[in-house]
């Protein structure tokens, strides 16, 4: 089966999912989101697949939602947030086979979440990552509020969410966000070496192990999804001007100026 904006290949017991919009730094189109959901279903149902590798074409892993295709400032086009449980961006997390993110370049926003959803993350020395949301006027969405603290701890997760600073690969390794950093040209060789090793282990036992470890994580994850949706909806309701400012600043390549809650017309300071 062919997928839009995504490549899918199998070799032996290892499947490779490649986000394939290199001209847009693999930014998430709706076609890519839908293809990701479908390919994860294929991986789950294919007994020959024992491990899935997720990576990006070109010089990026995934640059998050394509802001030229979808406006975050318009609530009715923020299609990532309208479902209370799993959305297309979350399907990697729902895969019942071991998953490895080969982070070959920038991973931000929804792309950063997709890396977090993988069981293991290995980064190229050219990789860089950011939550990005606060820089574009958004609260924590896409279940990052549940996944990130599990990866790096509560304090560091909140620092990353509050600041949205970009972190290089070495910093990501230092805080435990990735398992290790390898030379860019060696990334896929190292990832496939690990994938083949995992694939050589008993597949039923490995899947059961993942189920044991992930069961409480998935329960928590599902419970927090409505909170992410509420945060997005409330932000649009009371601070959409900050989302619009974040979008303008992003396209104009400048720092945004956020205003927070605005006084209603006719109100006076006490």
Image: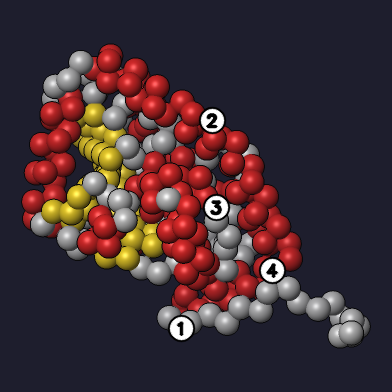
Q: Is residue 193 left or right of residue 44?
A: left
Which residue is label 4 attached to? Answer: 239
Q: CA distance from mark 4 to mark 3?
A: 15 Å
Q: Residues within 10 Å of mark 3 (few under 14, many from 20)?
A: many
Label 1 Cα crowd, 10 Å radius (few <14 / some 14-19 / many 20+): few
Q: Which mark is residue 219?
A: 2
| Visible residue check, residue 146 | yes
Q: Nearer the viewer, mark 1 or mark 2?
A: 2
Q: Is residue 164 left or right of residue 175?
A: right
Residue at position x 38%, y 47% in the image: 151
User: Label 3 to label 2, Cα distance in Å?
Assistant: 17 Å
Q: Position of residue 239 (x, y in %)?
A: 69, 68
In the image, is residue 73 above or below residue 249? above
Of marks 1 and 4, which one's residue comes earlier in the chain? 4
The residue that appears at 35% across and 33% down in the rendered structure is 39
Where is residue 173? Give x, y as percent. Answer: 25, 55
| Distance of label 1 from label 4 (alpha carbons) | 20 Å
Query: In terms of depth relative to the viewer, which is nearer, 72 or 109?
Result: 109
Q: Is residue 9 above or below residue 253?
A: above
Q: Quadrant of residue 52?
A: top left
- Within 10 Å of disc 4 (Cα), the crowding (few <14, some 14-19, many 20+) is some
**Sequence-wise, which precedes: disc 4 or disc 3?**
3
Earlier sequence position, callout 1 versus callout 2? 2
Locate the N terminus by quadrant.
Answer: top left
From the viewer's perspective, is the residue at label 2 or at label 4 nearer?
A: 2
First in sequence: mark 1 vs mark 3: 3
Q: Nearer the viewer, residue 166 or 160?
A: 160
Provide the residue designation for mark 1: 254
């Amino acid at each position: 089966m062919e997928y839009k904006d995504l490549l899918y290949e199998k070799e032996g017991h290892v499947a490779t999912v490649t986000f394939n919009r290199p001209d847009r730094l693999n930014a998430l189109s709706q076609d890519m989101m839908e293809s990701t959901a479908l390919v994860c279903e294929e991986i789950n149902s294919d007994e020959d697949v024992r491990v899935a590798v997720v990576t990006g074409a070109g010089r990026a892993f995934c640059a998050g939602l394509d802001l030229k295709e979808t406006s975050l400032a318009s609530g009715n086009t923020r299609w990532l947030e309208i479902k209370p449980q799993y959305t297309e961006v979350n399907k990697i997390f729902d895969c019942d086979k071991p998953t490895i993110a080969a982070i070959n370049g920038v991973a931000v926003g929804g792309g950063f979440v997709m890396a977090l959803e993988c069981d293991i993350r290995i980064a190229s020395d050219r990789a860089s990552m950011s939550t990005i949301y606060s820089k574009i006027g958004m609260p924590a969405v896409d279940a990052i509020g549940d996944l990130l603290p599990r990866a790096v701890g509560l304090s560091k997760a909140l620092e990353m969410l509050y600041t949205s600073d970009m972190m290089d690969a070495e910093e990501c390794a230092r805080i435990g966000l990735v398992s290790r950093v390898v030379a860019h040209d060696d990334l896929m060789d190292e990832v496939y070496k690990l994938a083949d090793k995992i694939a050589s282990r008993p597949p039923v036992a490995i899947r059961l192990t993942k189920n044991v470890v992930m069961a409480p994580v998935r329960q928590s994850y599902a419970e927090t999804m409505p909170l992410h949706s509420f945060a997005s909806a409330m932000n649009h309701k009371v601070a959409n001007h900050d989302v619009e400012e974040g979008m303008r600043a992003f396209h104009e390549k400048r720092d945004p100026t956020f205003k927070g809650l605005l006084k209603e017309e006719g109100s006076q300071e006490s």
